[in-house]
Every structure is written in C-alpha cells, then in structure tokens.
Image: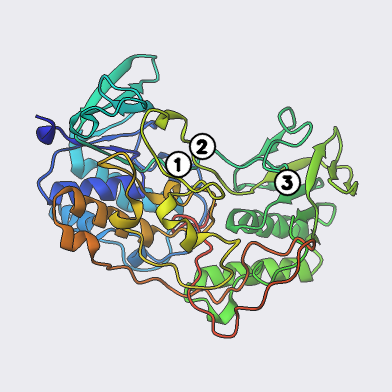
Amino acid sequence: MVSELPVVVIGAGPQGLAAAAHLVKRGMPVIVLEAGDAAGAAVSEWSHVRLLSAWSELVDAAAREILVSTGWVEPTEGYPRGGEWVSGYLAPLAAALGDRVRFGQRVTGVARQGRDLTVSSARARTPFVIHTVAPNGTESRVLARAVIDAGGTWRTPNPAGADGTPALGERTADIRHDIPDDVSALAGKHVVVIGAGHSATHAVIRLAALARRDRTTKVTWLLRRKAGSGLFGGGAADELPERAALGKSAQRAVESGAVELIRGFRVAEFTSRGIISEDGARVEDVDAVFALTGFRPDYSYLSEVRTSTDDVLQAVAGIAAEIDPNLHSCGSIGATGARELVQPEKDFYIVGAKSYGRAPTFLALTGFEQVRSVVAELAGDHEAAMRSELVLPETGVCGGAGDFGDAPAAGSCCAAPAPQLIQLGGIGAR
C-alpha cells in the first residue's frame, strides 16, 4: 500500500535532516537521499565561514530530542563556523538517523510511478518514484508515499551577468563562486568581488585584511544597485550581533580605502584583463574575480511533478508575496508552513532555501518551522500543521531590492521597521 511506503527527503543538509528527525519522532518511515558523501556536504564547502546565527538558532527541536537520547551534548555558546556546525550537529544527527540516510545518491528525477506529468487518472493514489544515480553511474529507483525536497540551491549559483544570464566571456573566464579562506596567494593582485549579499561581504572583509597587510593588493567591490541603505546591515537595530558586526567590518573596509566600492556596475562582459558594464564602464587589469551573486533553485529533476512557483522569484508560489524584495523593503516574514508550501502535486513539498527561490531572505529557523509543519500535515495532525511556532530576529535593515537609479523612488517604509531577513539558511554564506 502507498501509505506504508516511506517519505523520501531530498538532501541531508540542515532542513533535510530536520525533516527526517520530525518523521522519526512521529513514527513515520523515512529515507534521506543525499548526493554528497556526508551530511551537510554543501555546508562543508564553506566550513571556514562563521555563521551569523548562534547555536541556539541552529538546532531543530526534534533533532535535539534524537541527539540527546544518544548522549550528545548540545553546543550552546557562540557562533560556529560551517565546519563546526557539521561536526557538532549535522554529522551526529545523520549518524543517529542511521541507514535512513543514503549518501552518494544524486536525484535525477521525481515522478508518479508509471505516470508522466500529463496523466491525472488516480495520480494522488499512485506512489512517487525517485530516480537516483550513484557516483559510479549505478541508477536506482525509490518508491515513496510523499516527497520533501530540501535540496537547497548551493549547486546553482547565479551568473555574474547583470541580466541573469552569463555575461559575454563569463563561461570561459576563471571566476570563483566561493568565499575564499586563505587569500595569501592573491597578494599583490587586483581582485574583484561582485555581489551585495553576505557571501560577498565576507569575501570583501577577508580581502580587505590582505590589502592592509600588502599595500600592492587592490580590491574592487562591484554592485549593481546605485543606491540603497542596506548594504552594511542594520547596525544596532540588528538582533543578530554577528550579522551587525559583519556589516560594520565591511563599512570600515570601504571607508578606510582598503576596498574600492563601485555602485551601479551591471556586468556585461569579461575580457582577458577586465570587466565591462552595460553602460561601457570598465574595470581594468583584473587578476581574480569572485562572483558571489546569490543562488537559484534547480527544478530540472522536478519536470514530471506538478509544481506551483512564482514567475519572478522561482519561489514556492504560496510564500512569494511575503518574501519578494521587489515588493518589501521592510516588513515581517510570516510563517511558512504546510499551508503556504502546498503544491498541486499532493504530498509533495519544497522546503528550505529552495522554497525561497532566488530571494535572499532565508534563515535556518524558518526551515525548521517549515519541516515541522509539513511533517505534521503528512502525519494527519492538521492542528499542529496550522500552528505557527516561528519567532525571528529583527534586522534593522530597510534595503529591499536596491535602487537601480532608473525607476521612480518608492515611499519609505522605514518609519517603523519590522523584521526583514536578508540571510540564507541561517548561515554566513550565500
């Protein structure tokens, strides 16, 4: 029977493992499919970056219960780096979940068994089939009663091109999309950082420190927006101290001259030695480029399930209006649970950073609330699914999508700022 099949969770990151923990707590069978070879594989790629959320905001409640039963001692002090989050929480949680977590299983397709996208007959009563491929090329299929896609967006960074497609020359240019750790090899070079999010800010701060040590190093920071007050964060009004400190450090780097900030630069072309903007401006003699311009979701393996996503953000349609930076430069982000995340495909949910599409407004706390609600709905506990248990910190930022300088200025919303999230996954990296 379909009801006896497991719930399949895609991704063994923070939200995927939390979903599995909630399923186990409710006595529901679960299989977690992870493309990487360990829990938190994407987080491990920025293991050197300090998170902007404290430990208390980085551990899911159901996961905590499972871990405590194994003798795990919860970290409670400070702000971990990505690697510490993995070793202190994600890896132990995956170990506690045991063989429910299957590594080296990249999902290549999700569908209804024997039915493509166009077939409606008995669709809701038909099992899901999840296609996977292992690193050695072995293909497999897993049947499921429901699917929770917590696959994230880490593998699909946005291009540097200002129009959302790779700029001329970008595909062949040597461009990095990671936050650098050891930057000593860049001493004496001209390094360009593109992007306005937390990943770009982290990179700028690290490179600014290098520029202070080695005065022959030049750092240029390129922003598409011509104006906007949110670049350096919310300062004293930010209830996440590490996030406030990050913004202040970036501001000092610019004001001290260690970093040259260029606004209104929309990348159009990469040449052998420079970058050209849409209006012909140039940044010359460039040795290295870090394009940290955010991420976008990968829906390629969901082509045979019926999804509803927003045309602008590529976010789940039910939450798009709450998180669209084109509509909200200040405002509270409402709870995003099963009711908002529901899809046309029954018992299929997109959660975590992927549910927010291209919106840079996601915290780990939001993802934990999402999976709690979704699992409650799958378990038939509709009251718990409808209940909101989400409390979020205030940012003190009134930024929105930024002023491109080619549209009428909107009225200010900053008279009474409410919480606005500008961070992905509760992490220090975008």
User: Between disc 2 and disc 1, whose residue precedes?
Assistant: 1
Report the residue at 46% width, 45% height from top.
309
Q: Determine whether, in the image, residue 87 is placed left or right of residue 361.
A: left
Report the residue at 35% width, 39% height from top.
11
User: Between disc 3 and disc 2, whose residue precedes?
Assistant: 2
Q: Which mark is residue 310?
A: none
User: Between disc 1 and disc 3, whose residue precedes?
Assistant: 1
Q: Give SS at disc 2.
A: loop
Inspect this view and state whether residue 105 appears. Answer: no
Which residue is disc 3 drawn over? Answer: 162
Tag 1: amino acid: Ala
Which residue is disc 1 drawn over? Answer: 42
Q: Give SS at disc 3.
A: loop
Which residue is disc 2 drawn over? Answer: 155
- Establish if 317 lies above or below 102: below
* Residue at the extreme bottom of the image, as rendered: 415
Which corner quadrant of the image does residue 36 belong to?
A: top left
Q: Mark 2 and mark 1 in contact? Answer it, CB < 8 Å.
A: yes
CA distance separating discs 1 and 3 = 25 Å
Q: Give SS at disc 1.
A: helix
Tag 3: amino acid: Ala
Which corner quadrant of the image does residue 227 belong to?
A: bottom right
